[in-house]
Image (spheres, rainbow, N blue to C red):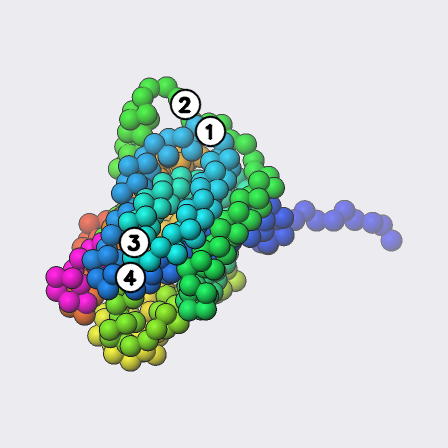
Amino acid sequence: MSSQASPPASADAPAPSVYRRPDFTAFLAARLLAVLAAQVQAVVVAWQVYDLTREPIALAYVGLAQFLPMLVLLLPAGDLIDRFSRKPILAASWGLGAVCSAGLWWLSGHGAAGVAGIYTVLVLFGCSRAFSGPALQSLLPQIVPREQLAQAIAANSMLLRAASIGGPFFGGLLYAAGGGALTYAICFVCFALATLLLLAVAVRPTVPASGAGTIWQRFGAGIRFIRSRPIILGTISLDLFAVLLGGVVALLPVYAHEVLHVGPEGLGALRSAMAVGEVTAGFYLAARPFDRRVGQRMFIAVAVFGLANLVFSLSHWFWLSFAALAVAGAADMVSVYIRGALVQFSTPDDMRGRVNAVNMLFIGSSNELGEFRAGSSAATLGVVPAAVSGALCTLGVVSLWAWLFKPLRQVDRFEEATGA
């Protein structure tokens, strides 16, 4: 019987699982530790500041202290990330995060007198996030090949949201059991371990962007690139205004204390609720990542996010509030997956730092500046009217952006976003 050569592999055969790449799994582990530390720290700082001041405007200052340094540093950070090795920049930013946790650890025993110091540390933490955010997004395509990038984005988002489930809830339990000292000590350890794990990850080298011209000229090229791509501009601006106007995370300490009448454990559960929805959707996306009608699905997801926040705003029942936040989290997970893939597929490697810096600036504006908007609105209008009006504004933004960015609404597959 004559032997026959094995047939060549089909071009349509699925790519190997991204989980089989050791560098990707090590990268995920490092990110999980850093996100866990950041989530625990976020919920404890918010509760501690509100517990010490009993003023909703204090929560606004928590967001503002982190946003302002990001606003100043994100643009030069994006330029540096395109011109130098990204892994050392990310490692240094996580190291600074460990220093910030140590500072909060020390301040935790100073009571109300330490609030000003807490704001100072949060400013420093905002500086570290200005570099870590765009560096993280720009580094992923250097770890996995392009054919596995969409799956890596889905898996990355899902596993990171898993840390978001345990982080806030664990943070609430830690604060109730041992106060800020125990909580911030654990955050310090997590940031330090994340830094050490990252240093062991191998990344593919890339050709750095040209250093010709001034920093403003180089970043101006990035801005012009984004403006010439309506899919990128529409994607990141939709997230900016939808979350900036409709986010309710900053109001959770007030809702937990004055509306739902639960303690720090209940606040941790509410902060985890969105992560429960995100991970549930993330598991589905990691197993069955879709690549059809992605533009339409993103607009639908953001609309569901607004409707779920509206239900939460009006609820006085803890479990209904929890369920509404979980639905909002699931919708946000779908939006994050589509948004991340569209930006990555649309951006050349030598422009990733600057594009991701602008993206992180928009995300930071929607989160930290959104916390300031929510806190100041609650101080002026009351917590429930502020949350309701914000949710309605999100629905209005979805309708307006669907009309303004028709190419984004009509994009079908991720690959179609290349050059668009």
Q: Is mark 3 on a helix, strand or loop?
A: helix
Q: Mark 3 points at which residue?
A: 113
| 3 vs 4, front mark | 3
Depth check: give the residue in front, 284 or 183: 183
Q: Mark 1 points at which residue?
A: 84
Q: Is residue 99 visible?
A: yes
**Amino acid type at mark 3:** Ala
| 4 vs 2, front mark | 4
**Amino acid type at mark 4:** Leu
Q: Are marks 4 and 2 in contact (CB under 8 Å)?
A: no
Q: Mark 4 points at which residue?
A: 52
| 2 vs 1, front mark | 1
**Dot 4: few (<14), some (14–19), or many (≥20) neighbours within 10 Å?**
some
Q: Distance between the residues labelled 4 and 2?
A: 49 Å
Q: Name the residue under label 2.
A: 210
Q: How far apart are marks 4 and 1 (CA)?
A: 43 Å
Question: From the viewer's perspective, is 280 left or right of 244?
Answer: right
**Amino acid type at mark 2:** Ser
Question: Which residues fall within the magenta stretch?
Answer: 372-383
Q: Distance between the residues labelled 3 and 4?
A: 9 Å
Up/down of 75 relative to 185, above or below: above
| 3 vs 1, front mark | 3
Q: Residue at x 38, y 60 (%)?
A: 44
Q: Residue at x 32, y 48 (%)?
A: 117
Q: Is mark 2 on a helix, strand or loop?
A: loop
Q: Which residue is drawn at 35% across and 55% down?
A: 110
Q: Residue furthest top?
A: 212
**Dot 3: few (<14), some (14–19), or many (≥20) neighbours within 10 Å?**
few
**Dot 2: few (<14), some (14–19), or many (≥20) neighbours within 10 Å?**
few
**Amino acid type at mark 1:** Phe
